[in-house]
Image (cartoon, rainbow, N blue to C red):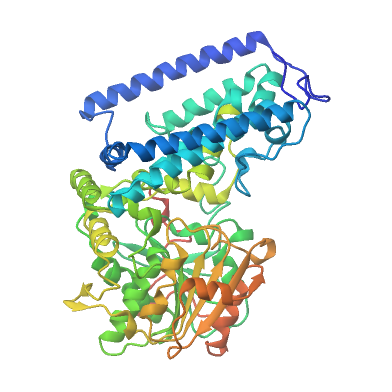
Amino acid sequence: MSSPAKTGTAQEGAPAPSYDPVALAESLRAAAEKSAKVIGDFAARQAESGKSMVADELGIGKAFMELAAKMLANPYRLAEAQMNLWWEYMMLWQASTAKLLGGAAEPVAAPAKGDKRFRHEDWEEHFLFDYIKQSYLIAARWLHGAVGSVEGLDEATKRKVDFFTRQYIDALAPSNFALTNPEVFRETIATGGQNLVKGLHNLLDDIERGDGRLKISMTDPKAFELGVNIATTPGKVVFQNDLLQLIQYEPSTTKVAKRPLLVIPPWINKYYILDLREKNSFVKWAVDQGLTVFVISWVNPDERLAHKDFEDYLTEGTLAALDAVEKATGEKEINALGYCLGGTLLAMAAAVLARDGGDDRIGTLTLLAAETDFEEPGELGLFIDESQIAYLEDLMWEQGYLDGKQMAGAFRLLNSKDLVWSRMVTKYLMGEREPVMDLMAWNADATRMPYRMHSEYLRRLYLNNDLAEGRYLVDGKPVVLSDIRAPLFVVGTERDHVSPWRSVYKINLVADTQVTFLLTSGGHNVGVVNPPATSKREFRVATREASAKYADPDTWFAATPVKQGSWWPEWCDWLAARSSAKVAPPPFGAPERGLPPLDAAPGRYVQQT
């Protein structure tokens, strides 16, 4: 069988097969041994735990049973859809025949702009692969349309069916299979199949790393070490309690802004998303702009902290850190920044302080990809309903926490094209190793969450939307976000699968203060981690005064001009316009006030696995 090419013969300049049969046999033998061990270990663990190897915690089977019943209830529409599919395939046959005979033919189905799966030239220029590609796209379009047009499903079931139908369609893409991916096909011919054997070893390594379940590694886990080549900004821990260590960073300028900056990251990942390598560390950049930076490093909880609730994270977390920053610097006002759920917690803390006596220590609020209204949480909401929360509560009751690996799987599904299928092709079919990426190393460093806290925020924020609707109580009184008077700088990211930007934008509906809203290109992480020196992104930004009329997000988007570059300098300029004079940097901690410097950054809590 010849290697596919534009003319059907071996492509000029293609690499000749070069392989060692003995080495290939040895690789296969080693893979077989590794496979047997992995399967045996997994089966033994399942038998010992008494758990079923098949589960449907997400209710997928039930949703598709409902779909099937509704589809069969309208056989006419089903027949019409099948006729449309047949007609499109007839058009493809005609166009492909014309192309094969040397004529011109417009494609019947074309991939979406930017679809990286079909970027290799053979998908367009080689007859067979072009036909496979279009055949898949026709079937995918038909299946998605047939499922989406079914009437009578409730909205939650409809969204779940739509989401998992797309997962199924993505899984069956011809780019995912060796014989129907031209790039993989060529590599297999050129290496005598060594790429597939290497890929098998990569697959078995990932299964072994996941204790019998596939855990796709995103980068070389040995490439980064905390405090050595990642999370290296100099600083010291100046305060700690059961839930957090507070890191104060060493100044790099002779003068600093009088107001310090307190950063509250999410506790569902580790804080160093904001302190990766020096070239893309937000913390290092902020320090270099003359800010005295404090960052919360949350504990990685185990069963001993199962009783900690959401209010504990508010009082022993954000408010305790705020008190410590005031003690360490002597400053009565701070600038506060919260990322993702850390931003939600910060907004709640600011509202509680304003409610209980007009505490105005928070001079400005910056919220990064942080929702305060959870009515529309995007596709993440598919994983949050009564039955799924009940399942998680049963699971957490047994161990006292939610294992970070369980949540990581849900996040990968939200962006499966980039985080699952493209990586499977690269690692398991092309046989390549993972690229060395600090962001992916951070992504793999999962954290646990206490049983009570995780249950509360899933139910009260996501499921019931208590915060936005004024039902969330702290100290027996409701938290009202309109009590906040500090100016807000709110960042959303265009391709955010975790905190959809239109949901983040809803802060404009509840805030009774000046709101500067900035929308940047990118996703939940890469849109935030956007250093100016290497930025290829763009953003929109506009400020709304408290008295101004509300504009819906799409109107705002259309009316707001685009700017090129990173959002970091824009935020820094905003902060400088609302901050006070420059002063000499404060010392580390305040030993005389009970805050002696403790560990060197990045501290001990972030090292917990």
Residue 373 lies, with reference to residue 188, above or below; the image says below
Point out residue 128 in the picture as x, y percentages from the top left corner.
66, 26
Name the image quarter holding residue 271.
bottom left
**If the image is split into quadrants, where does the N terminus sit?**
top right
Q: Is residue 163 left or right of residue 24?
A: left
Q: Is residue 125 left or right of residue 265?
A: right
* Depth order, front residue of 444/244: 444
Residue drawn at 30 percent across, 83 percent down: 353
* Depth order, front residue of 71/172: 71
Any part of residue 599 in sight: yes
Point out residue 289 in the picture as x, y percentages from the top left corner.
61, 75
Q: Is residue 285 left or right of residue 303?
A: right
Q: Report the number of discs.
A: 0
Q: Is residue 601 left or right of residue 577?
A: left
Residue drawn at 69 percent across, 40 percent down: 106
Residue drawn at 38 percent across, 78 percent down: 509
* Depth order, front residue of 512/204: 512
Q: Of all residues shown, which one is farthest toward the right?
A: 12
Name the image quarter holding residue 88.
top right
Residue 296 lies, with reference to residue 180, above or below; the image says below
Point out residue 299 in the picture as x, y percentages from the top left corner.
34, 57
Point out residue 592 in the picture as x, y percentages from the top left corner.
37, 80
Any part of residue 183 in sight: no
Residue 174 lies, with reference to residue 457, above or below; the image says above
